[in-house]
Amino acid sequence: MAVTQQIRNWFEHFHANPEVSWKEHETTKEIARILTEMDVPFKTFEDVTGAVAEIGKGDTVIAVRADIDALWQEVDGVYQANHSCGHDGHMAMVLGALAYLKEEDLGCRIRFIFQPAEEKGNGSNAMIDRGAVDDVSYLFGIHLRPQEELPLGKASAAIRHGAAYFVKGTIRGVDAHGARPHQGVNAIDPLLAIGQFLKTVQFSPYEAYSVKLTNIQAGGDSLNIIPGTAKFGLDMRAQSNDVLQLLKKRIDTGIQQIAELYTTKIDLEWADYTPAAEVSEEAASIAREGIFDVLGQKGLAGDVVTSGSDDFHFYTIRNPNLKATMIGLGADLGPGLHHPAMKFNRDALVTGAEILAETLKRASFQA
């Protein structure tokens, strides 16, 4: 079967069988089945999902990463796993690049990392802890981009993601009868104060940042009970790691001041930190050459700067000598990433696999 058709078939399978972070068991089995069928050596792990495969020979190693998890979201009124971030396409493209390169005379080893739990912001750390980028010189990734960032037929050698923090908060007041508010501490009051406080957080207008409430839970079915407990979630973002840390400090201090004002306790869990991109110009230069090989000069776009985040960048944060970049691929993607009805032009998958193959081939002789 032609590689182009295999890429489409792989995508269709992954798209129809999404699995959320850390539960990508059948996805991992399907990747293992495909690698076995291709006669490519690989390993899986007993304690986490995901797989790592390798082709070529030599002491030098370059790598490419595909994220494999789906989101949990409401689709047509039903909550379910859903590939609305394009990870089904990423797996298909990376497998396609592997198929294109399998019989090539490569200048080194190429490692293919199928990483779980990108949407949780920490799957990359699990792969790092298990040696996925040990001895790797160059690391590449690829991500489908919204149409407002890149149109079909264009690709970028670097996505410059912002940094992100996600916060889970619990307000601990005291329940009371609705007729006797003086006997309780209404958790909704500090919750509303937090919403107003977030609008006052300001840094230099030359810096890109945002913080917003993304989840609120308080009270039950009985409307005559003042709730003593409320839970909330925050999404915090900044284009640089330094500004994100300033934002974290301001939010932490402000919320604790609100707790004191309302004589309650507010517990914060800082979860799923994702760092801003650390792009290697050497890796990006190789990616530009790979894009040029496939799309020509007219298809080569500038770097994509986005407030979105990706745990891909832990690979370089934790391995400063690793030269990495993530390729952005135009695919007429809309209405947007993480939209439950996200769609894109699937012809782009073949283009992406070809770009990855050319990029990896070039990197194999420069590493």
Image (tube, rainbow, N blue to C red):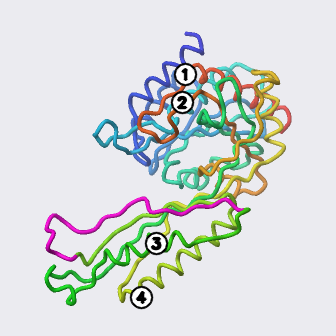
Q: How far apart are marks 4 and 3 (CA)?
A: 14 Å
| Percent x, y of residue 176 | 18, 82
Marks 1 and 2: CB-CB under 8 Å? yes
Q: What element carries label 2?
A: helix
Examine the rendered structure and indicate whether residue 231 appears above or below residue 21. below
Q: Residue at x 57, y 33 (%)?
A: 90
Q: Does the magenta stretch include residue 224?
A: yes
Q: How far apart are marks 1 and 4 (CA)?
A: 54 Å
Q: Distance between the residues labelled 1 and 3?
A: 43 Å
Marks 4 and 2: CB-CB under 8 Å? no
Closer to the N terminus: mark 1 or mark 2? 2
Residue under numbered circle 3? 196
Between marks 1 and 2 in the image, the one whose residue lies nearer the viewer: 1
Q: Is mark 1 on a helix, strand or loop?
A: loop
Q: Distance between the residues labelled 1 and 2?
A: 8 Å
Residue under numbered circle 4? 261
